[in-house]
Image (cartoon, helix red, strand yellow):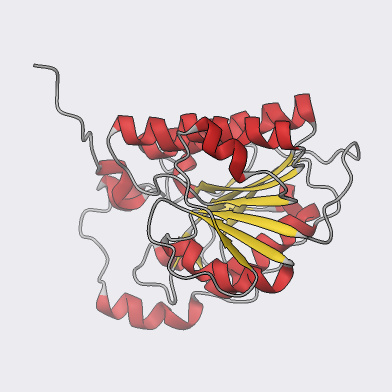
């Protein structure tokens, strides 16, 4: 559910932005783009971050380390939080990074006075809706795995920190970020890298974010998600998966069994993954 409330002033100019998950697939795309919009970009991950570019601060950090996360947010104006497990996985890593870790992030934001967070949620929060449905941000979560559950937790936790502490969050239910759509599912879920940048910048700059949920997709002709409740964010996608439709449909014939879970549901193959934990002995 989205809300805009004028209690908290807008974040407009940025002295220091924090990008977590900077070594991940999406983080590597955003890292050089965000540097142009702040005096200093603090980048963090547990993976290799390489050399610091001009205007960058490299701060490796494990999200389950509360003291380290507290230090990570010192002196930060706003956070783009991509950190954590980004695929379906075993319970313990998801618990540590995506649930305990996001709690540490919001507690650190509260202590350090950070008032704007762009939270990388996921379309897998709603992966068990059918591909024949079009849903909006008011539709109840229907996660397609433990990863989706962890992102639903992050959305709910961020709602609490807005209602109780005035920390504004834009939750991005990110679709499929690739240079070009790769399969039939991505005709609906594709988010171009340029549109990803537009979405993140709009989320940082909107005068009043409150607590908002935005589906991260380009201007695709095939639509599963309705962003009308996020109109106040001002995100205007400019790309579309449509130019690749003929190529994809020729290379990937329709499934003969349209009842198959990965075809019937918006989460695709995620609805059939796991469980990864071994049963108790």
| Left or right of residue 24: residue 264 | left
- Of 11 and 144, which appears nearest the observer? 11
Where is residue 235? Give x, y as percent: 72, 63
Give the answer, above or below, for where 56 lies relative to 275. below
Image quadrant assignment for residue 89: top left
- Residue 106 percent location from the top left of the image: 63, 34
- Would you say residue 164 is visible in this rendering? yes
x and y, in percent, of residue 105 in the image: 59, 37
Q: Is residue 220 visible?
A: no
> In this picture, is 247 found above or below 32?
below
Depth check: 55 or 106 in front? 55
Seen at 73% across and 37% down, the residue is 112
Q: Position of residue 268 (x, y in %)?
A: 34, 51
- Residue at the location (20% across, 59% down)? 256
User: Which residue occupies the extreme left position in the image?
Assistant: 281
Q: Nearer the viewer, residue 13 or 142?
A: 13
Instruction: Name which residue lies at 61% across and 40% down.
Output: 71
In the rendered image, the vertical position of residue 263 relative to residue 107, given as above or below = below
Residue 54 falls left or right of residue 93: right
Q: Is residue 212 left or right of residue 63?
A: right
């Amino acid at each position: 559910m989205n809300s805009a409330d004028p209690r908290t002033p807008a974040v407009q100019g940025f002295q220091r932005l924090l990008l977590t998950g900077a070594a991940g697939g999406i983080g590597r795309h955003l890292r050089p783009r965000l540097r142009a919009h702040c005096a200093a970009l603090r980048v963090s991950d547990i993976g290799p971050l390489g050399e610091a570019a001009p205007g960058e601060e490299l701060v490796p950090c494990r999200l389950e380390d509360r003291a380290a996360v507290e230090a990570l947010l010192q002196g930060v104006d706003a956070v783009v939080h991509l950190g954590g497990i980004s695929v379906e996985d075993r319970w313990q890593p998801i618990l540590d990074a995506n649930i305990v870790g996001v709690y540490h992030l919001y507690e650190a934001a509260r202590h350090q006075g950070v008032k704007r967070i762009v939270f990388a949620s996921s379309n897998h929060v709603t992966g068990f809706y059918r591909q024949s449905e079009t849903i909006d941000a008011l539709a109840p979560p229907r996660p397609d795995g433990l990863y989706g559950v962890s992102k639903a937790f992050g959305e709910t936790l961020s709602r609490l920190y807005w209602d109780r502490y005035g920390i504004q969050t834009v939750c991005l239910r990110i679709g499929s970020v690739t240079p070009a759509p790769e399969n039939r599912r991505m005709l609906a879920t594709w988010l171009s890298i340029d549109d990803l940048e537009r979405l993140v910048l709009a989320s940082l700059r909107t005068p009043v974010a409150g607590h908002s949920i935005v589906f991260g997709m380009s201007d695709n002709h095939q639509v599963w998600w309705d962003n009308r409740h996020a109109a106040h964010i001002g995100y205007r996608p400019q790309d579309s998966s449509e130019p690749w439709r003929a190529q994809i449909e020729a290379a990937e014939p329709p499934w003969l069994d349209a009842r198959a879970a990965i075809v019937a549901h918006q989460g695709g193959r995620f609805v059939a993954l796991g469980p990864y934990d071994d049963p108790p002995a």
